[in-house]
Amino acid sequence: MKTKEIYDFRKNYTDYKKPCVFEGYKLAVLFDEKDEIKKLGGKWNQDLKSWSFNWSNISETDADEIETFLEARGGAESFDYQPQGEAASKKYICVNWSKSIPYLNRATINATFQQVAEA
């Protein structure tokens, strides 16, 4: 995030009510705050990956199954995912998703998985 975006975010911030169930939340901090964040245990990791998915023209049953999985984790609980071509699975959260039903009994889901830092 850019400096102005961080300030704007902080103006509208509301407390996060969900429990922290794993390490690895992404933080957006100002450069002059980095040393304080490091003292609190924050770590820099520029190698975390993000994946965008588009499941289109899938059955509503399959879409419901995917959505149930994502809703159960609420964008906070991590899960294992092994990207194609990677040697091992890593921990991810789904930071956002949407579902649409463009045709009778057919659905589309768009989702973004963000890798989290493992302790």
Image (cartoon, rainbow, N blue to C red):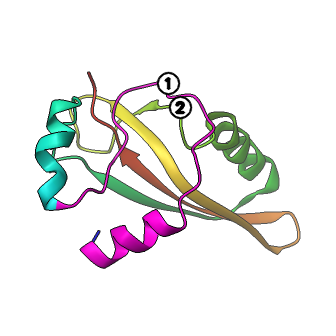
| Crowding at mark 1 (Cα within 10 Å: few <14, some 14-19, many 20+) | few
Residue 77, image x, y percentages: 53, 31
Is residue 2 at all visible to an observer of this figure? no
Rendered image quadrant of residue 108: bottom right
Q: Nearer the viewer, mark 1 or mark 2?
A: 1
Of 99 and 55, nearer the camera is 99
Q: Amino acid at mark 2?
A: Glu
Residue 85, image x, y percentages: 23, 43
Residue lying at 69% horizontally and 42% vertically, measured from the top left: 71
* Label ID, residue 76: none
Q: Which badge, 1 or 2, comes first in the chain's sequence? A: 1
Q: Which residues are magenta?
A: 2-30
Residue lying at 21% horizontally and 41% vertically, measured from the top left: 37
Q: Amino acid at mark 1?
A: Val
Q: Main secondary structure of the magenta part?
A: loop
Say which residue label 2 marks: 77
Of 44 and 56, nearer the camera is 44
CA gap, disc 1 and disc 2: 6 Å
Please state if 55 lies on the left or on the right of 6 as rendered: right
Say which residue label 1 marks: 21
- Element at label 2: loop
Q: Quadrant of the N terminus?
A: bottom left
Residue 105, image x, y percentages: 86, 63
